[in-house]
Image (spheres, coloured by chain):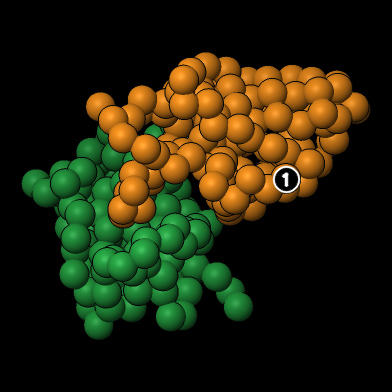
Amino acid sequence: EAGVVQSPRYKIIEKKQPVAFWCNPISGHNTLYWYRQNLGQGPELLIRYENEEAVDDSQLPKDRFSAERLKGVDSTLKIQPAELGDSAVYLCASSFWTSGGTLTYNEQFFGPGTRLTVL
Amino acid sequence: AQRVTQPEKLLSVFKGAPVELKCNYSYSGSPELFWYVQYSRQRLQLLLRHISRESIKGFTADLNKGETSFHLKKPFAQEEDSAMYYCALSGASYDKVIFGPGTSLSVIP
């Protein structure tokens, strides 16, 4: 099991250019998360998907960021245009999460991240 | 507001010495608290959660609701404990996890 797969691992672009990140979650995980981790800080949630539905995108800067999770499996996160302040590590995580009934925390499994540098 | 604070960015201890990584939180309600760890060149992974009351790799953490703290402790630090540690919390619905800024632990041989 490869775990959560992300690509690319590193990306260097000039400001105002577009960039896209790809994530393949663990098989069977219905919930997918995109986090941004700035230097010296913990991960911050950008968007959470349950299957193909974005159930929490309140922290996603919608003027330049977009995400999709077609067919409820792979996901892409896009920035267009990128700004200097977007330099960070973008993490994808997945879990199997259920709502209703007795809730239990199902561990989030993280990918290796994509380190974005905007020049 | 929901928030997790970790007052120490860096913590250095000698091998065999006790270690305590501090975590405080603010949350209106009953949160669930976690510790995540990231070893060098590895992925972020769950270390332990307060509800499990487990000792993982010799680490324990007790939730103190009065002091709103969830400090991580280990009586005898090992070199392999050197890593970045993140305290995190989630609400009762587990739909969102909020991470602290992290503490970098260095165990000196």
| Whole-percent x, y for residue A10 in the image | 47, 53
Is residue A82 left or right of A105 when viewed as pictured? left
Q: How many marks?
A: 1
Identify the residue at image location x=47%, y=74%: A26
Horizontal side of A19 relative to B47 (left or right) equals left
Q: Secondary structure at mark 1?
A: loop
Give the colour of chain B: orange
Q: Which residue is mark 1?
A: B55
Quadrant of the image containing the N terminus of chain A: bottom right
Q: Left of B99 or right of it: where is B35?
A: right
Residue furthest toward the left? A63
Q: Nearer the viewer, residue B5 or A72?
A: B5
The amino acid type, in three-letter code, at marker 1 is: Ser
Q: Which class describes the residues within 10 Å of circle 1: few (<14), some (14-19), or many (20+)?
A: some
Image vertical order of residue B18 relative to residue A19, above or below: above
The residue depicted at 55 percent of the width and 70 percent of the height is A3
Which of A56/A90 is in front?
A56
Q: Residue at x 35, y 74 (%)?
A: A30
Q: Position of residue B87 (x, y in %)?
A: 51, 35
- In the picture, one chain is green; tell me its letter: A
Q: Residue at x 79, y 41 (%)?
A: B58
Instruction: Classify residue A22 as left or right of residue B106.
Output: left
Picture layout, residue B41 above or below residue B103: below
Please indicate, yes or no, whether residue B94 appears anywhere in the rendered image.
yes
- x, y (%) of residue A103? 37, 61
Chain holding disc 1: B
